[in-house]
Image (cartoon, rainbow, N blue to C red):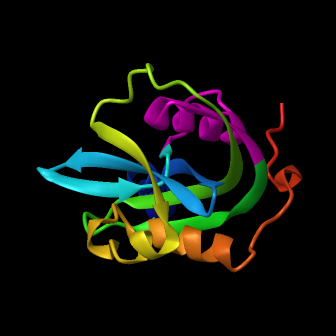
Amino acid sequence: ADPVSALDQRWHPVVTVATVVVRDDRFLQVEEAIGGRLMLNQPAGHLEPNESLLDAAVRETLEETGWDVHLTQFIGTYQWVAPSGQCFLRFAFAADPLTHYPERRLDTGVVRARWMTQEELRASTEHLRSPLVWEIVADYLAGQRYPLSLVRQVA
């Protein structure tokens, strides 16, 4: 058997999106119950079939926080291998908050959405769902932002 073909059949990175939403110097975070612990993450989730990365970022933010957002910039692409061995490929975006729908039911597992300062987030590293959470915020704070036109869906 061709070793490359065998590798292709077992290796499937998970494609995710994350959104950095900032209001009054506070970052919108999602508090999730995972394995009996409360963990923090950006509004983030999986890319769905036939969905653009941009649409996925807006959808996931609304589903996890009740906030409708307007994407403004692309922060970057991040690759991370979890302790389980699963590889994640994350596309991160910056967004402005538009409208909050407090009555909206949040995704399963999401306890609440909360606005946190940079200092609060930095002090919570042991509660971050993955190292990607802080890396993306750090890049955002360092001014790493690109035009959304770098992320294209080709029909």
The residue that appears at 26% across and 73% down in the rendered structure is 126
* Region in magenta: 45-71
Q: Quarter holding the C terminus?
A: top right
Please identify the residue farthest to the bottom as the structure is shown: 142
Question: In the picture shown, does residue 44 fall above or below 118?
Answer: above
What residue is shown at x 67% (from left), y 54% (from top)? 93
> Which picture quadrant has residue 106?
top left
Viewer-nearest residue: 27 or 57: 27
Q: Residue shown at 52%/67% (left/top)?
A: 79
As displayed, is residue 132 above or below residue 86? below
Percent from the top left, x then y, of residue 19?
A: 60, 51
- One can see residue 2 in this view: no
Query: Residue 142, how many percent across, how many down?
Result: 69, 80
Q: Is residue 22 magenta?
A: no
Does 103 sit left or right of 33 as displayed? Answer: right
Position of 129 with respect to 56 (left or right) is left
Could one spot residue 109 in this view of the protein? yes
Vertical relation: 84 (above or below) 9: below
Q: Does the magenta segment cover residue 54?
A: yes
Which corner quadrant holds the N terminus?
bottom left
Q: Position of residue 31 (x, y in %)?
A: 33, 49
Residue farthest to the left, as pictured: 36
32 versus 134 height, above or below = above
